[in-house]
Image (cartoon, grey):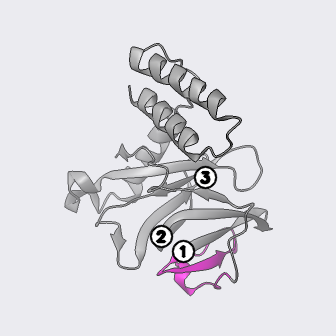
Amino acid sequence: MKNKILVLIAILALYSCQSKTESKNIIKTIVQDTLYKTIGGTADVSNTPAKDDKAVELIRKQLNVLLKKDIPTMTKEDRFFYYEAFDLNNDKKNEYFVGFSNSYFCGSGGCSGYILNNDGSVINHFTVTDFPIYVTTLSTENFYDLILKSDGLFHHIKMKNGKYPANPSIEEKWKGDLPKESTKVLDIYEKKLEKYSF
């Protein structure tokens, strides 16, 4: 049902953003057809990408280890995470951006999170970061550079000795507009990413 609602919202957004009069009738027909199928329960949502259950379990397991000392003081509401996969070093294996959005992990300067290797090992822990994170096409030490927002300013984050810096607020400020070719990850608020407990 959740997938059907997402399909419905996407189609309505596409329809509402359409400004060309020639294609309005085609879009309207597609929207109506999809709405009927969605409401009727016959829409095909089998191509909707599912999150990788193995990745979720890997991250969950790693968070239970990394946060072992914190867990006893956390509430149930504190114990959830978001994640997004992205291949940061072109090795054809995704790394995992892991973020949080609750008061245990977030403060006035931003939130904490992790970047994990495909095997679950920690590339780094970062603090005072606002989401989303931008992956650029620039690279340092064979890893893509990142642009992180901290305290309202964007910072250029580069790999240094196998790790990204933990505190983006003390790194070089990004000058100018965000590169159009950069990719947003952990867009927790706009993408409405699924959250997982740990």
- Mark before the other along the chain sequence, 3 or 2: 3
Cβ atoms under marks 1 and 2 closer than 8 Å: yes
- Inter-mark Cα distance, 3 to 2: 21 Å
Residues at marks 3 and 1, CA–CA distance in whole angstroms? 22 Å
Residue 181 seen anywhere in this rendered image of the structure: yes
Q: Which residue occupies the foreground of this view, 42 or 32? A: 32
Q: Amino acid at mark 2?
A: Asp
First to last magenta residue range: 149-174
Residue 134 among magenta residues: no
Q: Amino acid at mark 1?
A: Lys
Label 2 CA crowd tier, 10 Å (few <14, some 14–19, many 20+): many
Tell me which residue sits at (46%, 81%) in the image.
151
Residue, disc 3: 117
> Residue 19 location in percent, x, y?
64, 46
Q: Which residue is at a point 54% across and 28% down the rendered structure image?
A: 31
Q: Is residue 141 above or below residue 197?
A: below
Q: CA distance from mark 1 to mark 2?
A: 5 Å
Q: Nearer the viewer, residue 51 or 187?
A: 187
Disc 2, SS: strand
Tell whether label 1 touches label 3 (CB within 8 Å). no
Q: Position of residue 9 (x, y in %)?
A: 46, 37
Q: Which residue is mark 2?
A: 130
Give the residue drawn at x 39%, y 46%: 195
